Image (spheres, rainbow, N blue to C red):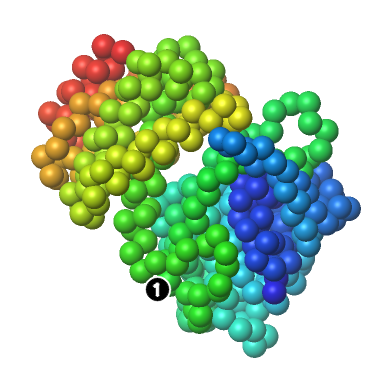
Amino acid sequence: MKALHFGGGNIGRGFIGKILAEAGYEVVFADINMTVIDRLNQDHGYTVHVVGEGVDQKETVKNVRGINSGDEAAVTAEISDATLVTTAVGPPVLEILAPLLARSLAARYRAGGAPLNIIACENMVRGSSFLKEKVLTAAGDDAALIDANTGFVDCAVDRIVPPVRGGDADPLAVTVEVFSEWIVDSTQFKGAVPAIAGMIATDKLMAFIERKLFTLNTGHTALAYFGQLAGKKTVGEAMQDDAVRQAAEAVMKESGAVLIRRYAFDPAAHRAYIDKILKRFANPYLHDDIDRVARQPLRKLGAQERFIKPLNGMLEYDLPHDATVRAIAATLHYHNPDDPQAVEMQYYRQAHGIAATLVKYSDFDNTAVVAKIEAAYQAL
């Protein structure tokens, strides 16, 4: 069995690639970082540092190699006989990747290749469905052939994998938390669902997607934006500040109320899930920079993302939303001259105001709630 995984970064190596290798797949990483690719081809393995409460161990991942994702012939050759394709490239890169996938998939099927499943393991809602749309658009006359033979399988992924801190000479070094969750939509596979330890199949994926989005993503990002306003540099520092932690926790409680109404989650069980997430944020072994979590604020203000989507649910069910309003206001305060989205957000807000910014980037125009966001922005 062979899995072609796009994205040789920390998430690819420390999470998805690790699970696939341990399930018996040869894992081929496709990336443009030739330092990583060359080292993978030299060592055919790497070490993952797993840390958490009572755990501090190094695990070796074997049977791996790499290719340059910019080499179309190499990518096409690997897809021709791959058993599975996965990605962890970041949502903006999926659209860039789509034309290459379209051409490679068409070549596979024209040559009589078997159906293939692709799982986009991205920090976004229904990333594989998004990728499918872009691939079929790029495929032209081959769209029907690709659609008939390719399973674009949506998933929910959850593991905190911070960047490796400076000073480590090994380009493959990666540190991850103990906890991980990879849940896939069992209804979208072409053929049988592969038996992979660490991958859970369900026919009710949206409940898991929104549980993770509304809890981990919402809470993590709220911590980052409130933390930056308080002068914190890492998520751990933000968690040690009672006011910041309580502000983020309040947002998670509000978004959790939506989940309880929408999916009939047990309130006590969901409260325990929130507590577990907060404990993960406070993991002293993980040094997670505020700016890593806060980057790309315009994407995070999207209509289907971690603040606006639960906020719309709060309004739908007539639930409290003051903490979420404050989190959105904190997001609008985010300044980072090294983040193009942060620069664009501040430019547009200053030129057009908060209401116009929320309409443009969040498709949100509830006048009463926008007024609350504007007041919260001024208060912060």
Measured from the top left, where is residue 107 in percent x and y? 66, 78
As helix, strand or loop, the secondary structure at mark 1 comes to: helix
Residue picked out by circle 1: 187
- The residue located at (29%, 31%) in the rendering is 251
> Could you tell me residue 322's position as x and y percent?
20, 26
- Please name whichever residue, 182 or 222, is drawn nearer the observer in this view of the structure: 182
Q: Position of residue 88 (x, y in %)?
A: 58, 52
Give the crowd class for mark 1: few <14, some 14-19, many >=20 residues within 10 Å: some
Say left or right for 39 vs 21. Answer: right
Q: Would you say residue 76 is visible in this rendering?
A: no
Indicate the quadrant where residue 348 lies: top left
Quarter of the image containing the N terminus? bottom right
Three-letter amino acid code at disc 1?
Thr
**In the displayed structure, would residue 38 be above or below residue 369?**
below
Q: Is residue 203 left or right of residue 172?
A: left
As drawn, 48 above or below 219: below
